[in-house]
Image (spheres, rainbow, N blue to C red):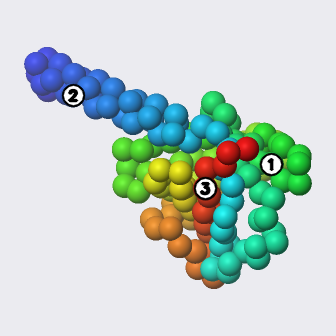
Amino acid sequence: MNPLTICVLACALAVGGGEVSELIRKDKAALQGTWKVTGAEDNGEKVPADDIKDLYLIFKGDAISIREGGKTDEKFAYLLNPAKTPCEIDMIFKSGPKKGQTDRGIYKIDGDNLRICIQSNKDAPRPRDFATRNMSNLSLVILQRSKQ
């Protein structure tokens, strides 16, 4: 490959990288704050309303905390790739028996509404849509921005 071609490719990657960085910054800013879980599905089954009635996800910086029953616990670090379709999220466990494990997922921000579909089986492919199926190891969480 000649030096000019290498230079053109390097410039194209640098420009593309800047656009992706801006998309990440924008989506990360949109996620910041407290989100109330309004619905959930696990392995094709709807999670009972009583199980999620007091469940919140809190995005602060590069971390996600879970608040339930008045207790807040920082559970995950996260990485976004909004340049993919659908947008991708990796959630890295910060503690517990899964510490260091990454669950791969997809997300969609629509104003004050957020959908996240997560694959918890590290050997299975990332979800491609916002649905779960029996024995799929997929979880779907539907959230709404909270004033809390």
| Gap between marks 1 and 2 measured at Cα | 43 Å
Graded by Cα atoms within 10 Å as few (under 14), some (14 to 19) or many (20 or more), the crowding at tag 1 reads some
Mark 3: which amino acid? Gln
The residue identified by callout 1 is 67
Q: Which amino acid lies under the numbered mark 1 shown in the image of this protein? A: Arg
Q: Earlier in the sequence, mark 1 or mark 2?
A: 2
Mark nearer the N terminus (3 vs 2)? 2
Q: Nearer the viewer, mark 1 or mark 3?
A: 3
How many C-alpha atoms fall within 10 Å of the one at disc 2: few (<14), some, or many (≥20)?
Answer: few
**Among the 4 quarters of the image, the one containing residue 122:** bottom right
**What residue lies at 17% left-to-right and 19% top-to-bottom?**
7
The residue most toward the front is 147
User: Which residue is label 2 attached to?
Assistant: 12
User: Where is residue 113 shown, x and y percent of the image?
Assistant: 53, 56
Q: Earlier in the sequence, mark 1 or mark 3?
A: 1
Q: Which residue is mark 3?
A: 144
- Quarter of the image with the C terminus is top right
Amino acid of disc 2: Ala
Mark seen at residue 55 = none
* Residue 27 drawn above or below residue 97: above
**Which type of secondary structure does the marked residue at label 3 adopt?**
strand
